[in-house]
Amino acid sequence: DAREIYVGLTRHRHEARVVVERDRLDALCRQRQEDAQVPATDAMVLERLFREARTYSEKVNVVDHAADRVAFVRDGSLGTREPIGQGIDVRRVIRAAR
């Protein structure tokens, strides 16, 4: 996301390279074209990259899923606001958070 790119491009000492998934970006560009067989131009791929780079994806932590964050910090009470995904060991997560 934008923050990751900013950090990556401002912490280097000599040079920085941006490595992107051109095939993925090309496929996304082709979805919006009338003829999906025509490869996306470099300009189209760069525009798609820049559009993605302007978005932010928030990192989450177990406390982000607590119904009452103060109670969670105080005693580890999770009391989730929404169902937790299948396969997640909630007790283990709570122990780790404590």
Image (cartoon, rainbow, N blue to C red):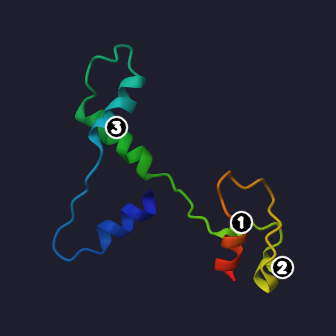
Residue type at the position of mark 2: Ala
> Which numbered dot is residue 24?
3
Sequence-earlier tag: 3 or 1 = 3
Residue type at the position of mark 3: Arg
| Residue with the mark numbered 2 | 71
How packed is label 2: few (under 14 Cα within 10 Å), some, or many (20 or more)? Answer: few
Residue type at the position of mark 1: Val
* Mark 3 → mark 2, Cα distance in angstroms: 43 Å
Farthest top residue in view: 35
Q: Position of residue 94 (x, y in %)?
A: 71, 74
Q: Nearer the viewer, residue 71 or 26?
A: 71
Q: Nearer the viewer, residue 69 or 5?
A: 69
| Residue depicted at 80% across the width and 85% down the height | 74
Q: Position of residue 93 (x, y in %)?
A: 66, 71
Q: Is residue 22 above or below residue 68?
A: above
Q: Position of residue 41 (x, y in %)?
A: 25, 30
> Which numbered dot is residue 90?
1
Q: Is residue 34 left or right of residue 95?
A: left
Q: Is residue 55 left or right of residue 22?
A: right
| Residue depicted at 43% across the width and 47% down the height | 52
Q: Cβ–Cβ below 8 Å for labels 3 and 1?
A: no
Q: Nearer the viewer, mark 2 or mark 1?
A: 1
How packed is label 3: few (under 14 Cα within 10 Å), some, or many (20 or more)? Answer: few
Sequence-earlier tag: 3 or 2 = 3
Where is the N terminus found, in terms of image quarters?
Answer: bottom left
| Residue depicted at 24% across the width and 74% down the height | 12
Quadrant in which residue 34 is drawn: top left
Q: Is residue 2 above or below residue 32?
A: below
